[in-house]
Amino acid sequence: MESIFHEKQEGSLCAQHCLNNLLQGEYFSPVELSSIAHQLDEEERLRMAEGGVTSEDYRTFLQQPSGNMDDSGFFSIQVISNALKVWGLELILFNSPEYQRLRIDPINERSFICNYKEHWFTVRKLGKQWFNLNSLLTGPELISDTYLALFLAQLQQEGYSIFVVKGDLPDCEADQLLQMIKVQQMHRPKLIGEELAHLKEQSALKADLERVLEAADGSGIFDEEEDELQRALAISRQEIDMEDEEADLRRAIQLSMQGSSRSMCEDGPQASSTDLSSEELRKRREAYFEKQQHQQQEVGRPGPRSHPRERPTTSSGGLGSSQAGDAAREEDMLRTAVTASLETAKGNLKAERKK
């Protein structure tokens, strides 16, 4: 289809588009067609003057506008016919008795020119296929051989005048190319007005879509801010939980150490039900160990060796071993409590993410 010359409508220059689409090239311009129209006007004036330049008919003729052209770009059938004579082409009315007596099948012709009121367009055979080259269409419209006669009959019913173009048309690239191949048309071209309306509709839909997307982007920002707030709240709750777990861990360690002291001696210092600081717990353990050492010295047992840290008489070898056991148990309990705390924090985080 790209090789087919097709002028689209500009103003009211449909006669120019009709001729150029017929001849498949920019053969005529408005200036050239205007020159032909002026020539026809002058010929008509001379004929009217033969009846006398003082006659009423002549004066009326001079006052009337040209019948061959107007300011909008319209040109009459006489202008089109004279333009085609330059190329040795002739127009014959399709439904005239003269042509109908010939009984020629439309598919055996080469081209037609159709006119309704002030609009002209060409139907032409290129290669072995027919095309509607109406300048009001967005492109050439393929017409099958079986549909051609029906198409022309439909135009006649709508009030169109149809002219058969007789003579040899100038050679063109599209005709030569389409002699070798056939084209297929998946979508028929639309009228230019329909295409413009379609484009306006698409533009309106695009504008609506952009507004929707802008609104969606705004709500997306709000959603992101809400998500960030929820994440901050979740982190805050986790920190509070971890602080509570740390407090529980400290209490568990203290109670564990108090339980160890009770197992060593029933009359040892009793733990308070309230939380004790690490310094208080250390002092109580040292007091207990000193009491045990003093009792051993009274019964004549070998005195304990000095402990290398803080107080020389605090611990013996056996009590040092006991202290080491207590420290190991405390470390194990600390690791267990920390592990449990981490597992709890992980569980809470997973639950928040699922929400």
Image (cartoon, grey):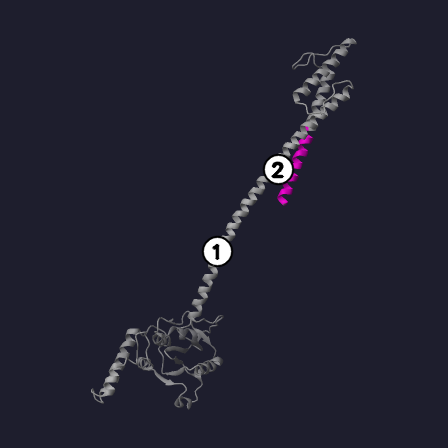
Question: Which residue position holds label 2?
Answer: 237
Work out whether residue 344 or residue 83 is closer to the camera in this orientation and state it. Answer: 344
Task: Give the residue at x 74% y 13%.
Answer: 291
**132 lies above or below 353:** below
Query: 81 or 40, which lies in front?
Result: 40
Q: Secondary structure at mark 1?
A: helix
The stretch in magenta equals 334-354
Mark 1 residue type = Arg
Main secondary-structure element of the magenta-colored stretch: helix
Query: Which of marks 2 and 1 precedes in the sequence?
Result: 1
Residue 343, magenta (yes or no): yes
Q: Quadrant of the N terminus?
A: bottom left
Amino acid at circle 2: Arg
Where, quadrant-wise, is the C terminus in this rendering?
Answer: top right
Residue 241's x, y, as percent? 64, 35
Q: CA distance from mark 1 to mark 2?
A: 39 Å
Query: Vertically, is 340 above or below 25?
Result: above
Residue 211 — which label? Answer: 1
Q: Is residue 287 left or right of residue 104?
A: right
Query: Where does the image place residue 254, in percent across and percent down from the top left?
Result: 70, 25
123 or 347, nearer to the observer:
347
Look at the numbered discs 1 and 2 and tell me whether their residues touch, using CB distance below 8 Å.
no
Query: What is the quadrant of residue 12 in the picture?
Result: bottom left
Asked if 318 appears above or below 109 in the picture, the reply is above
- Whether residue 325 sits left or right of residue 233 in the image: it is right
Question: Is residue 332 among the parts visible in the rendering?
Answer: no
- Name the residue: 74% across, 24% down: 259
Counting from the top left corner in percent of width and height, residue 30 is at: 30, 73
The answer to whether 152 is drawn above or below residue 214 in the figure is below
Residue at 51% x, 51% y: name it.
Answer: 217
